[in-house]
Image (spheres, rainbow, N blue to C red):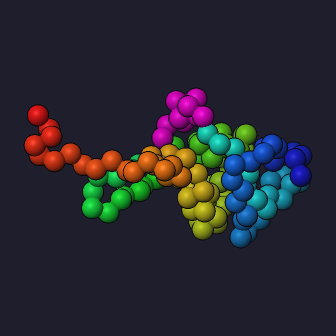
């Protein structure tokens, strides 16, 4: 499958099947393979997921600019235009596919931290 503009990702951590394939020159992108992120990815591209675990209900939001940079990096260089041309549901699927990598305590056995009581602030 790797030819032209579609880079190869060996042993992807996540694969997202696209509802609407995207034509990139002579290639047809039908899925996005993403590797697991490393610290350098966050340093270079920013944290794409904003997480608040201290409210009554957890809140997750995406930084769209950082998320597209991160998706390009984790796909080993899939061009930005691929994500710009995506159906919004496909792009959303890609965002949620990488979200667990940036949310503390996801896929871990430890309990999530509790917000400090007023008495604990001193």
Q: Position of residue 53 (x, y in %)?
A: 34, 52
Pick the front one: 119 or 40: 119
Q: Residue furthest front?
A: 109
Q: Position of residue 108 (x, y in %)?
A: 51, 49
Which span is picked out in magenta?
38-49
Pick the front one: 34 or 55: 55
Pick the front one: 70 or 104: 104
Magenta stretch: includes residue 44: yes
Residue 22 seen in this snapshot: no
Residue sitting at x 74%, y 48%: 12
In the rendered structure, the answer to whether residue 115 lies left or right of residue 76 reads left
Residue 9 seen in this snapshot: yes
Image quadrant in which the C terminus is located: top left
Pick the front one: 7 or 118: 118
Q: Position of residue 30 (x, y in %)?
A: 79, 62
Magenta stretch: includes residue 114: no
Residue sitting at x 72%, y 65%: 18
In the rendered structure, the answer to whether residue 85 lies left or right of residue 51 reads right
């Amino acid at each position: 499958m790797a030819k032209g503009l579609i880079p190869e990702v060996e042993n992807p951590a996540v694969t997202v099947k696209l509802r609407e394939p995207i034509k990139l020159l002579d290639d047809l992108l039908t899925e996005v393979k993403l590797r697991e992120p490393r610290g350098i990815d966050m340093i270079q591209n920013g944290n794409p997921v904003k997480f608040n675990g201290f409210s009554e209900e957890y809140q997750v939001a995406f930084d769209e600019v950082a998320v597209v940079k991160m998706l390009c990096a984790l796909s080993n260089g899939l061009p930005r235009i691929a994500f710009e041309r995506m159906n919004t549901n496909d792009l959303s699927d890609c965002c949620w596919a990488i979200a667990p990598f940036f949310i503390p305590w996801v896929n871990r056995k430890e309990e999530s931290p509790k917000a400090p009581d007023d008495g604990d602030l001193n």
